[in-house]
Image (cartoon, rainbow, N blue to C red):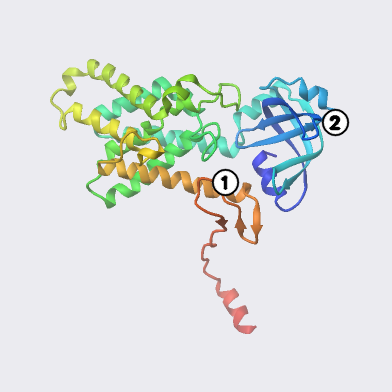
Amino acid sequence: MTLTEIRRAAQNGAVLARVHVQVESAAPKLTREQQPYCELALADACARMTLRVWSDHPAYKTCSALTGHEFIELTAEFHTHSQYGLEARKWTVRPLTDQEKGELLRGPADLRAKQNADWEFVEKTIEIINDPRLRVLCEAFLKEWGDRFRRTAAARNYHHARRGGLVEHTAQMMRVAKEVAPLYPQLNLDLLLAGILFHDSGKLWENALSENGFVMNYDERGELIGHISIGLELVNALWRRLSAENAEAWKNLVPASEDVRLHLLHLIGAHHGELEFGSPVAPKTPEAMALHYIDNLDARLEMFAAGYTTAKPLAERIFDRVRPLPGNLVKALDKFHQQSSSAKEDRRLL
């Protein structure tokens, strides 16, 4: 089972399961009574959990010797703790074989299929961009940075915080944009789609995962200047190179190439919506405002979906708050289903 499947099953009581994970880190710690223990951060393609190894556990020495990045199988009785979330009891560990490691890195079949479909959708959507400058820019980005893009998370914690999560987030935003744009004819769909592709492009450094693991290392460039600034720098560098290569073809296009560049940069810089959330400028064009709300919509609905499987239940159909959502989660209303004629007849007989 995956960690997500185990966490979902453990909400209904203890579950005996095996999970394949990577060790993100192994940290020696002390209890309040100053007794040593080891805290392992474990991750698979979709989720994370913490395993605390007490000093009297038979595997304490083995786990204490881990340095991070190892791949293991954890067999345990899993349960949900009201304070600490998913925990393991009566557990054992063993190293994964090379074949098992390869299967783990490919991710669950359903997630792998979804991310492949999302990637194809991003590629096909870029093909419909009419403005040749924006289309060439997007194609050059995917050609040069596509492999890194496909293993990047959309966030470190809050939403799509998994290997390939940025592709999922980008594809869904593009789907929303294509549905919304016909309703608001003033929107420049070419610009909006390009802005969606590039709005989080700086996360290829801020939230990149390694080629052979689920560990999201910290990157000095990401820490020092952040993904918005990196995205602005990336687009400017690509634009300068491509505009030099296509100077003759682009010189008489309308709108002017410099205007296109500035508006695209504005979408990247303004996508957080407010200065207090990290944007250097607030949205000042229809496309910038649309991108900001589409980004927020997809991110927050993803937080709801994940929250229903990870948040602590407070009462029937009520779950603890998942930050940065504004309050406790309440189970969504089930969709209406038309009753069959036979069901209606049964109700009349009752």
The type of residue carrying mark 2 is: His
Residue at which label 2 appears: 57
338 versus 218 height, above or below: below
Q: In the displayed image of the protein, which residue is found farthest to the bottom?
A: 349
The kind of residue on which mark 1 rests is Ala
Task: Decide: few, some or many residues near mark 2? Use Cα within 10 Å; few <14, some 14-19, many ≥20.
Answer: some
Q: In the drawing, does residue 303 fall left or right of residue 35?
A: left
Q: Position of residue 198 (x, y in %)?
A: 36, 31
Q: Along the horizontal axis of the image, is 328 left or right of 54?
A: left
Which quadrant of the figure has residue 26? top right
159 or 135, nearer to the observer = 159
Q: Position of residue 344 (x, y in %)?
A: 57, 77
Q: Is 128 in front, or is 90?
A: 90
- Going from N to C along the chain, the mark reached first, 2 or 1, is 2
| Circle 2: element type | loop
Q: Which mark is residue 306?
A: 1
Q: Quadrant of the N terminus?
A: top right
Total marks shown come to 2
| Residue occupying the point 22% across, 18% down | 246
The Cα–Cα distance between marks 2 and 1, rounded to whole angstroms, is 32 Å
Q: Which mark is residue 24?
A: none
Q: For the residue labelled by badge 1, is the local secondary structure a helix, a strand or a loop? A: helix
Q: Is residue 334 above or below residue 159?
A: below
Name the residue rendered at 26%, 50% in the picture. Answer: 184
Give the image location of residue 54, x and y in percent.
81, 32
Residue at the image position 57 percent from the left and 46 percent from the top: 306
